Amino acid sequence: MTAAVTLQAFDPFRSGKLVLYQVTYSSGWHGFEMIPFALLGILGGIYGGLFIKMNMKIAGWKKGNAWLPGPITQVAIIAILTALINYPNFYMRAQASELVYSLLAECSKVVDDQFVGIIMEIWVHNHPTFFPFASCEPDVPCVTPGTYAIIGAAAALGGVTRMTVSIVVIMFELTGALTYVLPIMIAVMLSKWIGDAFGKRGIYESWIHFNEYPFLDNSEETVIPDIPSPAQICSKTAFWPSIKSLRFEVESKPPTNMTGLPHLHGIMFIESRT
C-alpha cells in the first residue's frame, strides 16, 4: 500500500496512472472467447518457434561472413530503413507508448485493434443469435478487440522467451487488466507448449549456447554414469606377495602427477588419487 501511494505521488509516467498502459474495459470476457484466446496462444507458439530458428540462422550467417560491417553500422542501417518505411504511415509517426495504448484500449471503432478481435466482433455483430453468443447482452458491445491485442502480445512473448508466470505478471502490471489474467495464462501456457515442440530452448538460451557461454540448462537432461567412488579415487598398481618387496616398490616408485598416500587393501597395493 505504501509503495502504491508513493508511486502515485511521484507519477513517473506523467499520466496520473499507476501502470504504463492502464486500460479499463466496460465488459469482461465470455466463455466462447476461450477458443480464440487458445488460438492466439497456438499462433504465438508457432511464431516464437519460427522466430528463434530464423534468428539463429541469421546470427550464424552473420558470424560466418567477415565482410559485414560492424554492429553499430548495422544498427544504424536498420534504424534508417525502419524510419523510411514507417514515417509515410500516419499511425507510425506517434510515440511507441501512444501506439501501444491505442492498441490495447477499449474503443468503439474496430479498425485500429487486433486482427482476431476484429473478426470476433464482426462475427458477434452479424450473428447475435448464434448459441455461443447467448451470454451477450443485446445492444451492448460483447467483444472488446483490444483484449485480443493484450493476449496476443503475451502469447507471442511467451513463444519467444518460453517464460510463463513472469509474462502474466508483467502484462498485468503494464495494463492493469486483472479480469483477463486467466485468458492470458491459458494463451501463454499454450504458446510455451507449442514453442517447445520446435525446441526446448527459448531465445535467451539459444543465444547463450550460440555464444558458447557456460550455462547449466535445466531443460536438458544429463545422465550421470553410475561409477563407484573407489574407482574414481584409487588405482591398482601392483600385486606383491611380501612386505619387503612392497617396501622396495614404494621407495623406488618414480614420481607421478598423482598425489596422495599409498595404502593396502588386503594384499593389493592401492595408490590414492587426490
Image: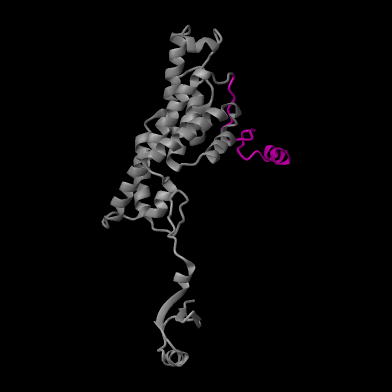
Q: Is residue 8 left or right of residue 28?
A: right
Q: Residue furthest front?
A: 241
The vertical placement of 273 against 163, above or below, is below
User: In the rendering, at what x and y percent does residue 33 appear?
Assistant: 49, 20
The vertical placement of 132 against 190, above or below, is above
Residue 99 in view of the camera:
no
The vertical placement of 239 against 226, above or below, is below
Residue 233 in view of the camera:
yes
- Tell me what residue is drawn at x 59 percent, y 31 percent: 22
User: In the depicted view, which residue is nearer to us: 222 or 126?
Assistant: 222
- Looking at the rendering, the stretch of residues picked out in magenta corresponds to 1-26
The quadrant holding residue 268 is bottom left
User: In the rendering, at what x and y percent does residue 265 appear?
Assistant: 49, 78
User: In the depicted view, which residue is nearer to us: 59 or 190?
Assistant: 190
The quarter of the picture where the N terminus appears is top right
The verdict on residue 182 being magenta is no
User: In the rendering, at what x and y percent does residue 80 appear?
Assistant: 36, 43
